[in-house]
Image (cartoon, helix red, strand yellow):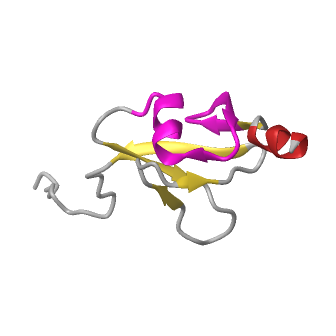
Amino acid sequence: MEENAKRERKTTEVYIDRKLHQSPDPTTGAALYVLGGVMPGYDLYEEEPGPVDDKLIPNSPTEIRLRNFTHFYSAQRNLNPGGRSLVWKLPS
C-alpha cells in the first residue's frame, strides 16, 4: 500500500512553452493547461521526435502519463500556417 502512495505522489519535470514546471504524474490535460498558463483559444501539443506530427493534448480530465523533461508548447487553435489568406502582389 505504501508503494502505491509513492507512485501517486511522483512529480515529473516538464517544459511548457520553454519554461520548466513540476507536475504530478500521472496528470490530466486540463491540469497541464493550467500549469502552463495556456490562454483561451490555444491548444497544447507534446513535441514528438522525428518527422511526425506533434501530439495534441486535449484540455480534458483524461489521465496522461508523463516522461521527465517532455516538451510541450501552445499554439493558436485556428492557426493555419499553410493557408493563403493573403495574396502579395509585386509592384510593377
Query: Residue 83 vs residue 62: left or right?
Result: left
Query: Is residue 80 positioned above or below 74 on the image?
Result: below
Residue 22: x percent and y percent?
A: 70, 29
Query: Residue 62 vs residue 81: left or right?
Result: right
Q: Nearer the viewer, residue 75 or 23?
A: 23
Q: Quadrant of the rendered structure where residue 10 is?
A: top right
Tell me the residue at 86%/45% (across/down): 1
Query: Residue 22 vs residue 81: left or right?
Result: right
Residue farthest to the front, as pictured = 1
Q: Nearer the viewer, residue 13 or 7?
A: 7
Query: Residue 26 vs residue 81: left or right?
Result: right
Tell me the residue at 89%/40% (across/down): 2
- Where, quadrant-wise, is the C terminus in this rendering? bottom left
Q: Nearer the viewer, residue 22 or 6?
A: 6
Residue 35: x percent and y percent?
A: 53, 29
Q: Nearer the viewer, residue 46 or 10?
A: 10
Magenta-highlighted residues = 14-38
Q: How many marks?
A: 0
Tell me the residue at 67%/34% (across/down): 23
Residue 66: x percent and y percent?
A: 70, 50
Tell me if residue 22 is in the magenta stretch.
yes
